[in-house]
Image (cartoon, grey):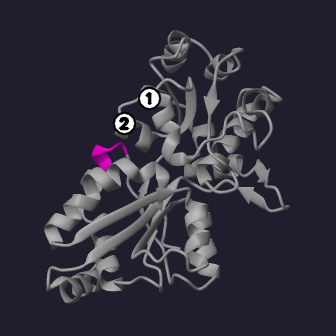
């Protein structure tokens, strides 16, 4: 933290500049409504944020098409891509979350979904209801798109429901279900879909109703990592992905236009004020060591 403070003092003394942050799309509400503006006001700089699927952002940064001061991603995978390419020196955990099923109060299935949220109906059986429209993100570009598949694969084992993942999600790249991360919850709010995958943090930030999931399938419990590791996802092209705990990491790329400002923002994310903002928007505390 002392190193961060020195960088902050050196880089922000003039009170000028622009902080550019690229973040996992699910973080849009907390970043653009709370943390980004608060940091900008405190340090007298301009904040610019952009959210997309974290893998897509990591690839754009690695190719030089994006040059943010700070990159935030969920799970280790996107950061490992940049570590391997030499674009970052380290990535620090800043928050955590868990998988839930968000649903629309406008849905014609809202009563059944609410009963599942209250534990009166099995959540997975409700999602199998004919005509229910489920939404998720692309597993090729977004960790959330991978994580909801892991959730269903684990649910098959936990509830002894073989074939559950295929029944609800269909093929891995099901065009009827896949939307961009930034539009997914907006579509849910508008009633265009009945239920979606979601991170508890993003769902709480938007005050949406949701179905909580047990630790065995919500990817949040490090004590259950051996159970989580029983499933894997085969992506098109042959690469295999394993479950990674739902931790948000932040890093300053070596190509950052203002690395001192980026380091100061990393310090803010882990400060008392930053952690309070994360908590207010439904995020859990950071867990695990830096990458």
Q: Is residue 213 above or below residue 232?
A: above
Q: Is residue 29 above or below residue 56?
A: above
Mark 2–mark 1 CB contact (< 8 Å): yes
Image side of residue 237 versus residue 261, left or right? right
Image coordinates of residue 11 in percent, x first then y, are 23, 86
Which quarter of the figure has residue 10? bottom left
Residue displayed at 54% across by 11% down: 108
Q: Within the image, what quadrant is residue 163 found in? A: top right
What is the C-alpha distance between the residues marked 2 and 1? 9 Å
Dot 2 falls on a residue whose secondary structure is: loop
Question: Where residue 53 sits in the image (x, y, percent)?
Answer: 56, 56
Q: Where is residue 33 shown, x and y percent of the image?
A: 27, 50
Quarter of the N terminus within the rendering: bottom left
Pick out the residue farthest to the right.
238
From the viewer's perspective, is residue 162 above or below residue 60? Answer: above
Q: Over which residues does the magenta segment extend?
A: 278-282
Q: Nearer the viewer, residue 58 or 167?
A: 58
Q: Residue at x 15, y 79 (%)?
A: 15
Q: Quadrant of residue 219?
A: top right
Q: Is residue 82 magenta?
A: no
């Amino acid at each position: 933290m002392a190193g961060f403070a020195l960088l902050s003092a050196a880089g922000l003394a003039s009170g000028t500049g622009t902080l550019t942050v690229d973040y996992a799309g699910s973080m849009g509400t907390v970043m653009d409504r709370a943390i980004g503006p608060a940091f900008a006001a405190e340090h007298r700089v301009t904040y610019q944020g952009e959210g997309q699927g974290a893998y897509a952002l990591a690839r754009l940064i690695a190719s030089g098409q994006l040059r943010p001061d700070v990159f935030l991603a969920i799970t280790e995978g996107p950061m490992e891509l940049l570590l391997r390419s030499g674009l970052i020196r380290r990535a620090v955990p800043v928050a955590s979350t868990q998988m839930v099923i968000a649903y629309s109060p406008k849905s014609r299935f809202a009563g059944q979904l609410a009963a599942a949220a209250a534990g009166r109906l099995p959540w997975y059986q409700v999602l199998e209801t004919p005509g229910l429209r489920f939404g998720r993100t692309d597993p090729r570009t977004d960790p959330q798109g991978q994580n909801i598949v892991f959730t269903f694969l684990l649910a098959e084992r936990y509830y002894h429901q073989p074939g559950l993942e295929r029944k609800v999600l269909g093929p891995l790249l099901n065009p009827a279900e896949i939307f961009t991360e930034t539009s997914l919850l907006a579509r849910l709010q508008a009633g265009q879909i009945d239920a979606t995958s979601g991170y508890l943090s993003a769902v709480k930030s938007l005050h949406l109703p949701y179905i909580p999931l047990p630790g065995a399938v919500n990817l949040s419990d490090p004590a259950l990592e051996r159970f989580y590791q029983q499933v894997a996802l085969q992506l098109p092209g042959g690469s295999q992905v394993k479950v990674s705990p739902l931790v948000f990491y932040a890093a300053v790329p070596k190509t950052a236009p203002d690395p001192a400002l980026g380091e100061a923002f990393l310090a803010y994310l882990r400060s008392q004020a930053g952690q309070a903002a994360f908590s207010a928007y439904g995020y859990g505390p950071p867990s695990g060591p830096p990458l």
